[in-house]
Amino acid sequence: MIAIINTGCANINSVRFAFERLGQNPEVITSPEQLKSFERAILPGVGHASVAMKRLKDGGWQQAIDEYQRPLMGICLGMQLLCESTEEGNVDCLGKIPGIVKQLDVGTLTSPHMGWNDLTVLKEHALTKGLTAQDHVYFVHSFAHTVNDATLVSGEYGNTFSAIVAKDNYAGMQFHPERSAKVGTRLLQNFLDWQL
């Protein structure tokens, strides 16, 4: 069973539909006490980091996510919230994945980074299975996790940033796998297949 954490600011339905297309029956949960009864969890996110972090803290999610021992993946802002801190609102985040989130230095490119982009696999992992340099995924973001030891896959837009990260049972995808056609579907299946 997959839990989709409802923080009140997330793109929940498209994530739910993506898992339903994979034959899953995800449940959107609104209470931190529910989390421990699920085999896997998704932390989706759209919006401003400081608002989302306040909702997580005020809702009691921080402790529940801290104590969760099974695979948990953040998507887009949800990935950023799993990191140590973010420049967006200058807030401390959940600290489950090492690294900080910085504003993309896009130079003359438009911001936010919106659209399809390719990926570079830096480390083999269950989450990167089947991913090739020819694959493209869909991004919408203006902040990104810096590249470090937790980075499995990087992306490039003005500067290099983390596209997929993982540490212990926590992982994140900066792009939207639920909007990334067949490649996204494969990556969500990788998450379902991920064994700790």
Image: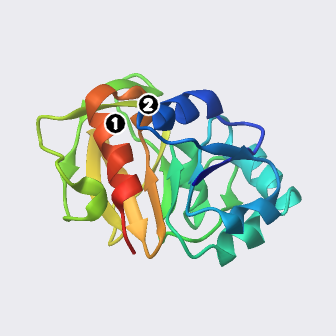
Q: Which mark is residue 21?
A: 2
Disc on res. 185: 1
User: Residue shown at 26%/35% (left/top)?
Assistant: 183
**Position of residue 103 in the picture relative to residue 9 (left or right):** left
Q: Which image quarter: residue 167?
A: bottom left
Q: How many C-alpha atoms fall within 10 Å of the one at disc 1: few (<14), some, or many (≥20)?
A: some
Q: Residue at x 74, y 69 (%)?
A: 64
Q: Are marks 2 and 1 in contact (CB under 8 Å)?
A: yes
What amino acid is found at the position of numbered circle 1 in the picture?
Thr
Judging depth in this view, the residue of 41 and 111 nearest the camera is: 41
| Residue 57 visible within the image | yes
| Rendered position, 68 above or below 175 | below
Instruction: Give left or right: position of 53 versus 167.
Output: right
Image side of residue 162 versus residue 126, left or right: right
Quarter containing the C terminus: bottom left
Instruction: Give how far across and how far down residue 151 sits, in percent.
Output: 33, 63
Q: What residue do we see at 54% from left, 35% from top?
A: 15
- Residue 108 placement, left or right of 53: left
Where does the N terminus fall, quadrant-wise? bottom right
Which of the two marks, 2 or 1, is nearer to us in this view? 2
Q: Earlier in the sequence, mark 2 or mark 1?
A: 2
- Outermost residue on the right side: it is 58
Quote the CA–CA distance across marks 2 and 1.
9 Å
Q: Position of residue 160 (x, y in %)?
A: 29, 48
Q: Nearer the viewer, residue 29 or 143?
A: 29
Q: Is residue 11 visible?
A: no
Q: How is the image coloured?
A: rainbow
The three-letter code of the residue at mark 2 reads Arg
Taking depth in this image into account, of 41 and 79 the one nearest to the observer is: 41
**Residue 159 location in percent, x, y?**
30, 44
